[in-house]
Image (cartoon, rainbow, N blue to C red):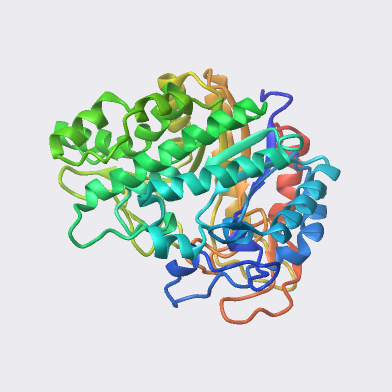
């Protein structure tokens, strides 16, 4: 049985959904610089900037009691010295719209929407100056919304910093003369300092913080001990962040590894004391897939998209991600064993190029994926894991992280393609009624 106050809902990010690119004083964001040109861009999204009330009505019909979104930094600051009141005003109405429908707003303070001018001037989170600017913005947001918002996520999938691939989502490019591993560690450290300072401020204002990481469960490819070591190394990319969220310090393995490799980031005198302020109230994870680890080989890269090694025992989605519901159960048990903290699943879902056939979208594959993951989540709860919420990724179709519209996750279809915006009409999929039933039964009727 799940808790009576279990959080059911969905999650999106501003830049993949809002649109309104030239409205309300918005400026370009670093996520715009990640667009490859293969699919679309983030300028129109699904026009939730104008249609969020319509979408919130659908979420209310589904039975949501929680909704995760992001504050678009590039909508809130027009230059380094100027806050944009029109952007704050938009989120005033946005948050009120959720509360009016009985839906708990769960904002993410950073979800890859840094204004481009901070990348161009400072190289993003590679700079402590940007940490200072971000912390001040967050304090302003907390001051404005702490009486309406209970749960906060500071950084989305912060451990993505350590995944092999470009760091433009964090507004940074590695200089040619810099060791790329040390550079990643510098961004890691700077964002953890930012996290800890904002975390302390949220707590001062009475809020609760969910420390978030993306978990790609990694199995040893063989029973060779070196493959097990490689698997442990892959998992450490998440643990280094989760350890700060749970314990307020770097884990001894990762700290020793940075010293041994000569990849220690620049630190200021009291940084370790600041990290002690980073302990959160709960952990939050995104989980979509698992991979396998082989000594000396990459188990995951994130250059143009997440690419993982194929597991012969598991099926793959059409986009090359493993379908591994048992991996979610393993992850929940592993994290709870390690930290004994409440856990919220704040992203999980199934991307597919849904098609309308005779006016309907029969996405049984999505229902099957989510049912199996929820079943394993419930088993983990029965095994003692304190899991307190499940938010599906993209409850309405939005652009993917690489600006692709054909990778759809929603219970609601949005009538647009990569190149043709069409009318963006919202159409319920078969999974809509299924998820509605799941929520109404608090997960008993799957």
In this rendering, position of residue 27 left or right of residue 163: right
Name the quadrant containing residue 292. top left
Residue 223 visible in the snapshot? no
Which residue is nearer to you in this view: 318 or 82? Answer: 82
Residue 441 drawn at (x, y percent): 76, 34
- The residue at the point 60 percent across, 56 percent down is 72
- As displayed, is residue 220 above or below residue 355? above
- The residue at the point 29 percent across, 43 percent down is 185
Residue 303 drawn at (x, y percent): 34, 61
**The N terminus: image quadrant:** top right
- The residue at the point 59 percent across, 29 percent down is 378
Name the quadrant containing residue 347. top right
How many numbered badges does the structure rendering display? Answer: 0
- The residue at the point 76 percent across, 71 percent down is 425
In this rendering, position of residue 211 left or right of residue 224: right
Which residue is nearer to you in this view: 342 or 426? Answer: 342
Which residue is nearer to you in this view: 368 or 270? Answer: 270
Residue 230 visible in the snapshot? yes
The outermost residue toward the right is 100
In this rendering, position of residue 79 left or right of residue 30: right
Which residue is nearer to you in this view: 329 or 5? Answer: 5
**The C terminus: image quadrant:** top right
Residue 26 drawn at (x, y percent): 63, 66
């Amino acid at each position: 049985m799940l808790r009576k106050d279990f959080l059911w809902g969905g999650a999106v990010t501003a830049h993949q959904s809002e649109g309104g690119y030239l409205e309300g004083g918005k400026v370009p964001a670093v996520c715009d610089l990640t667009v490859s040109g293969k699919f679309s861009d983030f300028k129109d999204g699904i026009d939730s900037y104008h249609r969020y009330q319509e979408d919130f009505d659908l979420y209310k019909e589904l039975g949501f009691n929680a909704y995760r979104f992001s504050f678009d930094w590039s909508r809130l600051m027009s230059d380094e010295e100027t806050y944009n009141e029109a952007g704050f005003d938009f989120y005033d109405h946005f948050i009120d719209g959720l509360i009016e429908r009985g839906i708990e707003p769960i904002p993410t303070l950073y979800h890859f929407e840094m204004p481009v001018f901070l990348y161009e001037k400072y190289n993003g989170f590679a700079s402590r100056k940007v940490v200072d600017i971000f912390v001040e913005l967050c304090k302003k947001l907390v001051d404005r919304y702490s009486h309406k918002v209970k749960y906060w996520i500071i950084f989305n999938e912060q451990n993505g910093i350590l995944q092999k691939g470009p760091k433009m989502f964090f507004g940074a490019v590695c200089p040619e003369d810099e060791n790329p591993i040390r550079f990643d560690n510098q961004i890691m450290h700077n964002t953890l300092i930012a996290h800890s300072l904002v975390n302390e401020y949220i707590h001062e204002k009475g809020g609760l913080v969910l420390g978030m990481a993306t978990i790609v469960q990694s199995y040893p490819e063989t029973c060779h001990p070196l493959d097990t070591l490689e698997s442990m190394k892959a998992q450490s990319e998440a643990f280094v962040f989760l350890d700060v969220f749970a314990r307020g310090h770097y884990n001894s393995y990762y700290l020793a590894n940075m010293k041994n490799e000569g990849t220690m980031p620049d630190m200021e005198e009291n940084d370790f004391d600041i990290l002690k302020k980073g302990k959160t109230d709960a952990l939050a994870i995104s989980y979509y897939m698992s991979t396998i680890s082989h000594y000396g080989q990459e188990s995951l890269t994130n250059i143009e998209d997440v690419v993982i090694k194929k597991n012969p025992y598991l099926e793959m989605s059409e986009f090359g991600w493993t379908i591994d519901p048992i991996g979610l159960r393993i992850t929940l048990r592993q994290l709870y064993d390690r930290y004994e903290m409440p856990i919220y699943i704040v992203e999980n879902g199934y991307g597919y190029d849904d098609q309308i056939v005779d006016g309907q979208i029969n996405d049984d594959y999505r229902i099957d994926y989510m049912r199996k993951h929820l079943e394993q989540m419930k088993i983990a709860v029965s095994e003692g894991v304190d899991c307190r919420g499940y938010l599906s990724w993209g409850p309405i179709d939005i652009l993917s992280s690489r600006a692709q519209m054909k990778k759809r996750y929603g219970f609601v279809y949005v009538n647009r393609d990569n190149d043709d915006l069409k009318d963006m009409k919202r159409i319920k999929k078969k999974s809509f009624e299924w998820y509605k039933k799941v929520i109404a039964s608090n997960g008993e009727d799957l």
